[in-house]
Amino acid sequence: MTAIVVPDYDAGIDFYCGTLGFELAEDIDLGGGKRWVVAAPGSGGRLLLAAASSDRQREAIGNQAGGRVGFFLHTDDFAASHAAFVAKGVLFHEEPRHEAYGKVAVFSDPFGNRWDLIEPKKAAS
């Protein structure tokens, strides 16, 4: 599981679960305005949505990887996933391209974090 700092829990849930289609795996009230919120893209990793609670944390929103791509979302059907995300208003920074490891395009979440949407190259059988 990887933590990602978001401005607030509901904004994170709206994008990751609503727009990208992740499953809301956990949303537990911890009291005092804190929640344990986990979004799961399917099989594999999970995101802990951590609401910023200090100036330092708010400054990290969207820049957790120093402006580089810091998060990677794999798909088995790049064309379908890309088209669905574009239709939902996801901001892509480039046209899809082919790399040695597969098909990829960089997009940003609404908070500024850069992601790769990747369909890994299938191994020769």
Image (cartoon, rainbow, N blue to C red):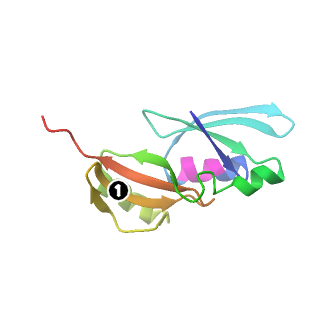
Identity of the residue drawn at 76% across and 50% down: 57
* Residue denoted by label 1: 104
- What's the residue type where badge 1 is placed? Val
Identity of the residue drawn at 68% across and 55% down: 61
* On screen, residue 7 above or below 94: above
| Mark 1 residue element | strand
Q: Quadrant of the C terminus?
A: top left
Counting from the top left corner in percent of width and height, residue 73 is at 43, 47
In this view, which residue lies farthest toward the front?
66
* On screen, residue 67 above or below 21: below
Q: Which residues are magenta?
A: 12-18
Counting from the top left corner in percent of width and height, residue 25 is at 57, 33
Q: Nearer the viewer, residue 11 or 2?
A: 2
Identity of the residue drawn at 38% across and 60% down: 105
In this view, which residue lies farthest toward the right?
32
Counting from the top left corner in percent of width and height, residue 4 is at 63, 45
Give the image quarter of residue 27.
top right
Instruction: Indicate left or right for 111 with 80 as reference.
Output: right
Tell me, yes or no, whether the highlighted magenta stretch contains residue 86. no
What's the magenta bit mostly, secondary-structure-wise? helix
* On screen, residue 104 above or below 36: below
In this view, which residue lies farthest toward the bottom?
94
Identity of the residue drawn at 30% across and 62% down: 97
Give the image quarter of residue 67.
bottom right
* On screen, residue 45 above or below 79: above
Q: Residues within 10 Å of mark 1 (few under 14, many from 20)?
A: many
